[in-house]
Amino acid sequence: MHARLHSPANAVVCLSDGGVVKRPGLGTRGWRGRLIICAVAQALNLREKLGRIFFGIVLLILGSAALIYAGDFAVFRIRVATNRNPYGSVVVNHYYAIAQKSGKTELIFDPPQPQLCVNALLPHAGAQPCWYLRKHPDQRTDI
């Protein structure tokens, strides 16, 4: 069984099968007998390193997403303020899907209508992006 004990900064203390091994005055960097360094301590160090890497990646992804949204929102607000084509219109086919007791679905189609959309990467002001509506012109409502 190996475990790392906290001791003065200039000593290495590990529990091994033979008992406590102390090497006062020797740090882990300059010491040649590194085999005594505990495997548990190395596993904890690896876990801490992987945890920091994972945390850094998560922060990078969240930060990038926040910057992309903030930049897209700023461009959209500038377009609204200067009246430079912030909104668009896409013809959408809307239909209702009504589930019946027999297990079948009845479809009721509305005539095609233009739908307001935003010329942006992400949805803003309660409207979907125009690029998304152009890709998905059929809008289904389940009842």
Image: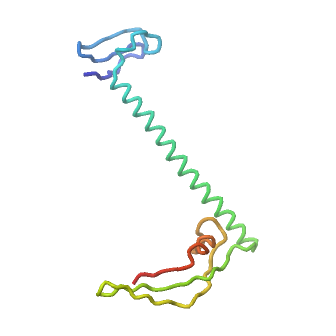
- Counting every numbered tag in the picture gives 0
State the residue in front, 62 or 131.
Answer: 131
Rendered location of residue 95, percent (x, y): 49, 85
The answer to whether 82 is drawn above or below residue 3 in the figure is: below
Rendered location of residue 68, percent (x, y): 61, 57
Horizontal side of 86 relative to 127 (left or right) equals: right
Rendered location of residue 9, percent (x, y): 42, 17
Residue in view at x 41 percent, y 81 percent: 142
Horizontal side of 108 relative to 84 (left or right) equals: left
Q: Quadrant of the N terminus?
A: top left
Q: Quadrant of residue 22?
A: top left
The answer to whether 86 is drawn above or below residue 114 in the figure is: above
Residue in view at x 43 percent, y 38 percent: 51
Colour mapping: rainbow
The answer to whether 58 is drawn above or below residue 123 in the figure is: above
Q: Quadrant of the C terminus?
A: bottom left
Residue in view at x 62 percent, y 76 percent: 117
The answer to whether 19 is drawn above or below residue 137 in the figure is: above
Horizontal side of 98 relative to 67 (left or right) equals: left
Q: Quadrant of residue 74?
A: bottom right
Rendered location of residue 91, percent (x, y): 62, 83
State the residue in front, 65 or 93.
Answer: 93
Horizontal side of 77 relative to 124 (left or right) equals: right
State the residue in front, 4 or 128.
Answer: 128
